[in-house]
Structures are given as C-alpha cells and as structure tokens.
Image (cartoon, rainbow, N blue to C red):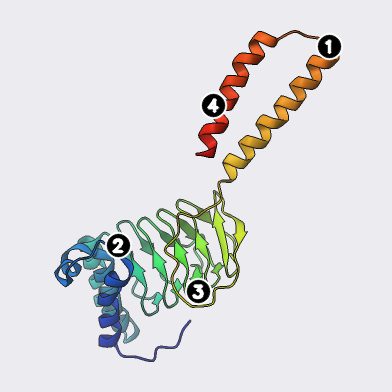
Amino acid sequence: MEKDDIGLWSKIKEDFSLPKKNDPALYTRFEVFFNYPGVWAVVNYRVANILYKKGFKRFARFLSGASQILTNIDIHPACYIGRRVFIDHGFGVVIGQTAIVNDDVLIYQGVTLGGVSLSCGKRHPTVHSFTTIGAGAKVLGDITIGKHAKIGANSVVVENVKANCTAIGVPARVVRQKRRTKTDEISLDHNVLPDISKQMFAYLIKRVAILEHAVKIQDNIDVSKEDEELEKIYKNFITAMQQ
C-alpha cells in the first residue's frame, strides 16, 4: 500500500486528468463529466472512504450505493485505491472491501477484484502499480498481482502473478515474462497476448499428420484421394491461423 502524500482535492484533480492521458477518444473536458463513469466512481469512493475511516460507515455505504446506481461500478468504501487509478468505461467493475489497488493501475470494464472466503480478514487481491487488468477479468482471493503485470481479458486469476508477467486463461497461467521496463508507465497494449490455443492446435495437427503417415506406410493403405481433400482443409486452416 502506497503512502498518501497529497490531499483529497489533489487526488480528485488527478482523477479528472486521467481520461485525457489514457483515452484518445476524449476531445473536450466537458465529456469527462458525462461519459466517464469510472472517474466518478473513483471520486465518489474517495469521499466515501474518508467518511468510512472517520466512523461514518453507514453514510459511506449509502454514498457508495448511490454511486453504484449512477455508475454501475461497485467499490467498497473500505478498500484502498491509490493515485491515478483509471477505470476505463467501467461498467460492471467490482472492487471488494479488503482489496488494495496501488498507484497507476488501469482497469477495464467488467473486472472483479473479489474474495473467495467468508473470513473477516484480508480476502481480496492486492494489485501493484502499473498493472493493466483486461476487460472481464476476475482476480479472486488474497493474492498479489506484481508491478507491471498484465491480466488478459476474461481471465480468472486465483494465484499470485509476479512482476513484469502476463497471465491469461481460466484459470489464468503466466505465459510471458517481459523485460523490466525502463520507465514506470501503464501499458495500454493489453491486446498483445500470446495465442496458446493456436499453438496447441498447430502442434496437434502436425502430430496427427505424422501418425497418419506412419500408419499408411506400415499397413500399405491407399488413401490418396482422402488425403488430398484433407490436405486442402489443412492448408486452409493453417493459412487462417497465420493471419
């Protein structure tokens, strides 16, 4: 958890400046007030969080509930959200009570930072700085997402992800570890993910072809006509996969 070194209004000012930095679709400041529910959800959270910590828990929960109705984003007022956290589009985002989201994290729509137990202790994820969490991803339990990590869209993460790693799948697995970045910045290239299904299909097709060839040679079976048809289908499939 990062140390809070600026006041509430300075944080809110930073929050409203994030769309211009992270979204090329923004043309005027006017749009921020009506087209960026993620910004409003974080701003409302900051006010509710202060009230919650000061003991006004019911009012804080009421404020977060009203914010949820307006933005369709559910952020518990007791969680921790650092500076410059940007929720892009945001609809359907859920951030649980004991979640910790450090500075400079990018969260897309449909993301859940949820719990997997009924314990009263820490039961939600900790997300370190400069992490990108793709649309629809579910990060569940008291796990840690390291600095500069990327979580692929619609992945379900139930184990720790180390710094500088990319995790995808259900359940998510680390499929790539990139070099350490020279500068601290949010990575917007969340679409650059390895296609492990494509690689597995290519392997299986080649393996089946080798086995068929071995069987034909051993049993002296003539399936040349069928083989020509399958070869055409195979070439079309490989061409499609390479595009």
From the image, tell me which residue sits under label 2.
73
- Above/below status of 156 relative to 38: above
From the image, tell me which residue sits under label 3.
128
* Marks 1,3: beta carbons within 8 A: no
Task: Answer few, some or many: residues within 10 Å of disc 1's Cα (few below 14, many 20 plus, some between 14 and 19).
Answer: few
Task: Answer few, some or many: residues within 10 Å of disc 4's Cα (few below 14, many 20 plus, some between 14 and 19).
Answer: few
Residue drawn at the location 45% of the way across and 58% of the way down: 190
Nearest the eye: 33 or 210: 210
From the image, tell me which residue sits under label 1.
219
> Which mark sits nearer the N-terminus, 1 or 2?
2
> Which mark sits nearer the N-terminus, 4 or 1?
1
Horizontal and vertical percent for residue 188? Answer: 42, 63
**Mark 2–mark 3 distance (CA, rounded to whole Å):** 21 Å
* Marks 4,1: beta carbons within 8 A: no
121 horizontally vs 93: left or right: right
Horizontal and vertical percent for residue 222? Answer: 75, 8
- The amino acid type of the residue labelled 1 equals Asp
Label 2 or label 3, whichever lies nearer to me, is: 3
**Mark 3–mark 4 distance (CA, rounded to whole Å):** 44 Å
- The amino acid type of the residue labelled 4 equals Asn
- Dot 3: what SS? loop
Q: Which quarter of the picture shows residue 77?
A: bottom left
Label 3 or label 4, whichever lies nearer to me, is: 4
